[in-house]
Image: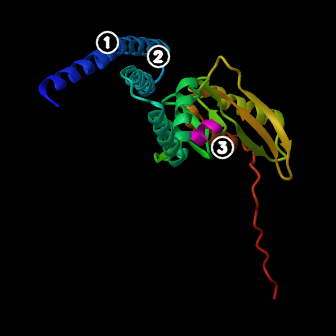
């Protein structure tokens, strides 16, 4: 081929692919601009919805890269490159990744659900998956708790989102459930007044919610009372321990016996 033939062939290629390349270039420029607008709008919407910051970033990036993949496919199609094989490869890769990361994807999905529906927040005391602790961090794959003995508990979000969750601090107040037993020989009315007096005298017991003191059961060796004051969620254990101690002291001072097993020593005569 002589020089003229090369020039003619190049000219034909330009006429054939030039408009496609220009069109693909314009589609890319316009598409990138539109993706930026959509991503910005999604981030603003998520921000107004008060979603967790990590969830906002993830969803924003997910939308951005999903749109970019679509844009790349459109650009390749405009140029004239067949995208059928390309789509099949992406689908196969996605399936392989999904099978390999099945457990992780379940935890990821659980994390997204927790961040969207917010069954609890950082600082809440919750019970889930047989564990009790204060929520320390809510992450994409796991939720971290600080246990009552200051141990760190890491729960996978997949199991956490699919199981029962007890949020002790969601309402802001908690009822302290205590049970005390007295002797059958003791005066029930006197004991009831004593329990109520101890409960109401505690400074952390709420006054706008009336505490209750009721006979719970007539047990084998004691009359058991259900003593139930209310307090702020963060004061639960302080109230629990203080009232337990104060009632024991008050019962001793009043001469009211708390039944307990007695061991009687039998002396042998010989």
Secondary-structure class at tag 3: helix
| Residue found at the very far left of the displayed protein | 3
Q: CA distance from mark 1 to mark 2?
A: 30 Å
Determine which residue is flagged by label 2. Answer: 46
Q: Magenta segment range? A: 157-162
Front tag of 3 and 1? 1
Seen in the picture, residue 257 relative to 250 is either above or below; the reply is below
Q: Position of residue 94 (x, y in %)?
A: 49, 39
**Label 2 neighbour load within 10 Å: few <14, some 14-19, many 20+:** some
Determine which residue is flagged by label 3. Answer: 248
| Residue found at the very far bottom of the displayed protein | 270
User: Between residues 249 and 152, which one lies in front from this camera angle?
Assistant: 152
Q: Position of residue 18 (x, y in %)?
A: 28, 16
- 134 to the left or right of 30: right
User: Between residues 75 and 137, which one lies in front from this camera angle?
Assistant: 75
- Asked if residue 59 is among those painted magenta in the image, a careful observer would answer no
Residue 148 visible in image? no
Residue 244 visible in image? yes
User: Between residues 174 and 62, which one lies in front from this camera angle?
Assistant: 62
Q: Residue at x 75, y 67 (%)?
A: 263
Which one is earlier in the sequence, the residue at label 1 or at label 2? 1
- 144 to the left or right of 243: left
Q: Position of residue 156 (x, y in %)?
A: 53, 43
Which one is earlier in the sequence, the residue at label 2 or at label 3? 2
Q: Residue at x 42, y 11 (%)?
A: 41
**Label 1 neighbour load within 10 Å: few <14, some 14-19, many 20+:** few
- 81 to the left or right of 179: left
Q: Which mark is residue 26?
A: 1
Secondary-structure class at tag 1: helix
Q: Where's the N terminus, which quadrant?
A: top left
Seen in the picture, residue 227 relative to 47 is either above or below; the reply is below
């Amino acid at each position: 081929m002589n020089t003229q033939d090369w020039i003619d062939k190049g000219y034909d290629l330009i006429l054939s692919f030039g408009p496609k390349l220009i069109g693909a270039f314009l589609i890319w420029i316009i598409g990138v601009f539109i993706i930026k607008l959509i991503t910005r709008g999604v981030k603003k919407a998520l921000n107004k919805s008060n979603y967790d910051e990590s969830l906002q970033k993830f969803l924003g990036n997910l939308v951005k890269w999903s749109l970019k993949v679509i844009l790349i496919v459109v650009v390749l199609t405009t140029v004239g490159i067949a995208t059928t094989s390309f789509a099949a490869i992406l689908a196969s890769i996605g399936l392989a990744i999904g099978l390999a990361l099945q457990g992780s994807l379940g935890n990821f999905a659980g994390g997204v659900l927790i961040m969207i529906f917010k069954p609890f927040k950082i600082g809440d005391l919750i019970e889930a998956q047989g564990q009790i602790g204060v929520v320390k961090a809510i992450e994409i794959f796991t939720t971290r708790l600080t246990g009552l003995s200051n141990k760190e508990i890491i729960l996978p979000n997949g199991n956490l989102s699919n199981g029962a969750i007890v949020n002790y601090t969601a309402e802001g107040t908690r009822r302290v459930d205590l049970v005390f037993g007295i002797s059958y020989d003791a005066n029930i009315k006197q004991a009831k007044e004593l329990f109520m007096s101890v409960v109401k005298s505690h400074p952390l017991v709420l006054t706008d919610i009336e505490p209750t003191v009721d006979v719970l059961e007539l047990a084998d060796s004691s009359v058991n009372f259900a003593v139930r004051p209310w307090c702020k969620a963060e004061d639960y254990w302080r109230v629990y321990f203080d009232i337990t101690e104060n009632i024991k002291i008050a019962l001793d001072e009043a001469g009211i016996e708390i039944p307990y097993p007695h061991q009687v020593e039998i002396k042998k005569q010989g």
